Amino acid sequence: MSTPFYVSPQQAMADRAEYARKGIARGRSVVVLQYNDGVLFVAENPSRALHKVSEIYDRIAFAAVGKYNEFENLRIGGVRYADLRGYTYDRDDVTARGLANVYAQTLGTIFSSAGEKPYEVELIVAEVGAGPEDDQIYRLPHDGSIVDEHGSVAVGGNADQISTYLDQRHRDGMTLAEALKLARASLARDTNGTERTLTPEQLEVAVLDRTRPQQRKFKRLLGRQLSLLLEEGSGATSVADVADESGEDAGSQG
């Protein structure tokens, strides 16, 4: 009888982590930044059907990189959790911290299970508060750990290089236009140091805007609204500015 091949638990976990990290790094990056009126999400994503950024609940949004089918299953589970908790208890009981804990348990269980491969995903869960000091941003790597982030965060692709670029340039109190231009510049940097040109059509952009009068704070920025914010000299600095100039309703496209 042959001796079974033995792999130490430490080596098995290291191999699973390396497998997940390689899958995540193949995806295009997503960046999340705080600005004066809320939280900005920007992803390099030319697809208009397969979203990397989505609304979860009133003040909570979700961003992800990696395998689409895997993070889409997590997104749907998060929406169901939020809806059930808000209906059973109170809408204020649905928080980014609670959702991040649920995701952490799910990812951690999958990562440590020998019966299935680890998820090749990295998530960001953000909640906009009454003021910038109340905003919450959580990053969840493939192994289910939770990292409490502040200011800016990047996941996927060359996230380390992008994070360094953002840390050096992001500041408190930035306008939406300033944060958006910084996010685009960070995503346009390749690993070899060269810069690409990213058009509005190549970006998926959304905000959690605390100034919106309605309960739902999530809004996608599309078309002319996005172009005006990225355009130098347009004078547009916030969602209200581009809504007025483009003739579009700031409360639409939730």
Image (cartoon, grey):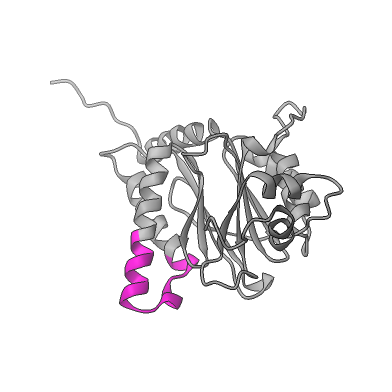
Q: Residue furthest left?
A: 1
Q: Count the numbered circles shown.
A: 0
Q: Is residue 3 visible?
A: yes
Left or right of residue 244, residue 23 in this image:
left
**Magenta-drawn stretch, dominant element (helix, strand or loop):** helix
Could you tell me if residue 140 is visible in this image? no
Q: Find residue 79 and report its horizontal and vertical position in percent.
A: 38, 59
Up the image or down, 242 lies above or below 120; here it is: below
Vertical relation: 13 (above or below) 2:
below
- Residue at (72, 60) in percent of width and height: 244
Residue 117 screen position, x and y as percent: 33, 36
Q: Is residue 150 in the magenta section?
A: no
Assign the N terminus to one quadrant of the image: top left
Instruction: Give left or right: position of 26 versus 240.
Output: left
Please identify the residue farthest to the top as the structure is shown: 2
Residue bounds of the magenta highlight: 80-98
Q: Where residue 118 appears, x then y in whole percent?
A: 37, 40
The image shows residue 95 at horizontal and vertical percentages of 47, 69
Tell me where residue 197 sits by quadrant. top right
Foreground pick, 119 / 55: 55
Q: In the image, what residue occupies the spot 79% across and 49% down?
A: 168
Residue name at image x 40 percent, y 56 percent: 103
